[in-house]
Image (cartoon, rainbow, N blue to C red):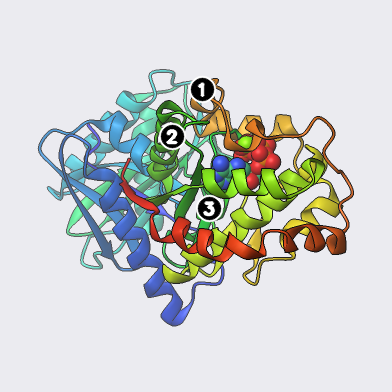
Amino acid sequence: MFKAFLVKYAEIGIKGKNRYLFEDALIRQMEYVLKPVEGTFHVTKEQGRIYVLTEGDFDYEEALEALKRVFGIAYICPVVIKEDQGYEQLEKDVVAYVDHVYPDKNKSFKMHVRRAKKTYPGTSMELNADLGGAILDAFPEMKVDVHNPQLLITVEIREKIYIYSESIPGPGGMPIGTNGKAMLLLSGGIDSPVAGYMIAKRGVKIDAVYFHAPPYTSERAKQKVVDLAKLVARYSGPINLYVVNFTDIQLYIYDQCPHDELTIIMRRYMMKIAERIGKEQGCLGLITGESIGQVASQTVQSLAATNEVCTMPVFRPVIGFDKQEIVDISLKINTYETSIQPYEDCCTIFVAKHPVTKPNIQMIKKSEKKLEEKIDEMMDQAVNTAERIYIEA
Ligand code: ATP
Ligand code: MG
């Protein structure tokens, strides 16, 4: 029955030139998510509104699910489109629409006619009254409520007639690509995919880097990260995932530095490498899934020590979240099941029994002096040999 979707977006802050950039990015992402859906879709912009028009049969549920993953969409309204065959037919079409969409007629409603085709007979007011009357005649259980209706039945009269009344919430946010690009440090855990999702939601395109430590971490652990990147890409669009071989650097740190400082020093090198790859790829920030106090390496002192090596801004969108709040989002975006698969993480392999929780930056720097001889070369090697995997949902 539904032949189109009207897409509504929050319009705050998107005036003038920004508006057109915003709309074009939105349309691009809508086309992208609809590509794998069964059916033929045309995303169009008409008079400041964005429609998805369809041709022939299409998978309604899947199309709707796809649109629910497009950042920037506030509401999705499924639309019935009819030819303009005069008022009598319009009345029949509107009554048939209500009958079909609302099996339970015990509802209050308000008519909202928009007469974009100015030659159409009657005023909007008259059409509201007439169509409302026709609905009441057909379904006496329904009642009109102009202040607080359960249903707002909209009829737009253009070259064709558009009828809709349902508003399905989209994910909100800003269209991907309207806010630059950032590099996500993506591990196999629960937090970093959520962090990537949250920053992408604000319109930021993302690339990702994963630190792999073979043979201490398995191919299966890497595959899990690829799987997570795929799930994030359902929202963010394609992701370039850089898999960095981190084994030599980890072993070197393990040999040269105090073991209780290992995690912090390792994390500092992760950030440095992520930043280097990010810069080469035009990223303007880094993203991590860190949350204050979650583990020893995420105390405020540890975060300060990790952050100290970065020159780019580091976005930590879950910094103030409790674990359960992060889990709730991972369940919503469907990454949780994959995240909890039990594959080893490179951070946990060399982890000390009693890691420092209040690292002193001067002491850390002193320990890092012991790496001077080989670390620059090893970092170059890690960056230059990174494997790039193009991830699409
Ligand atoms: P997550 O659930 O995201 O793995 P976590 O609670 O396990 O986080 P840590 O292991 O301390 O926390 O990692 C903190 C952040 O550092 C992660 O959220 C991620 O952004 C980054 N990170 C950790 N390990 C890796 C890795 N192997 N590759 C890439 N990034 C990583
Ligand atoms: Mg982790």
Q: Is residue 345 above or below residue 73?
A: above
Residues under labels 3 and 2: Cα distance? 15 Å
Camera-side mark, 1 or 3: 3
Location of residue 350 in the rendering, given as x and y in whole percent from the top left corner: 67, 35
For label 2, count other residues whose C-alpha is less than 10 Å away and answer few (under 14), some (14-19) or many (20+): many
The amino acid on which the numbered mark 1 sits, given as a three-letter code, is Glu
Camera-side mark, 2 or 1: 2
Q: Which residue is mark 1?
A: 337
In front of the other: 168 or 223: 223
Q: Quadrant of the N terminus?
A: top left
For label 3, count other residues whose C-alpha is less than 10 Å away and answer few (under 14), some (14-19) or many (20+): many
The amino acid on which the numbered mark 3 sits, given as a three-letter code, is Leu
Give me the disc on residue 26.
none
Q: Is the CB of mark 2 within 8 Å of ligand 1? A: no
Camera-side mark, 3 or 2: 2
Q: Earlier along the polypeptide chain: callout 3 or callout 2? A: 3
Q: SS at mark 3? A: strand
Q: Could you tell me if residue 147 is visible in this image?
A: no
Q: Earlier along the polypeptide chain: callout 1 or callout 3? A: 3
Give me the disc on residue 184.
3
Q: Residue at x 72, y 44 (%)?
A: 263
Residues under labels 2 and 1: Cα distance? 16 Å
**214 to the left or right of 163:** right
Q: Earlier along the polypeptide chain: callout 2 or callout 1? A: 2
Q: Which residue is mark 2?
A: 222
Q: Quadrant of the C terminus?
A: top left
Location of residue 356 in the rendering, given as x and y in whole percent from the top left corner: 86, 43
The amino acid on which the numbered mark 2 sits, given as a three-letter code, is Lys
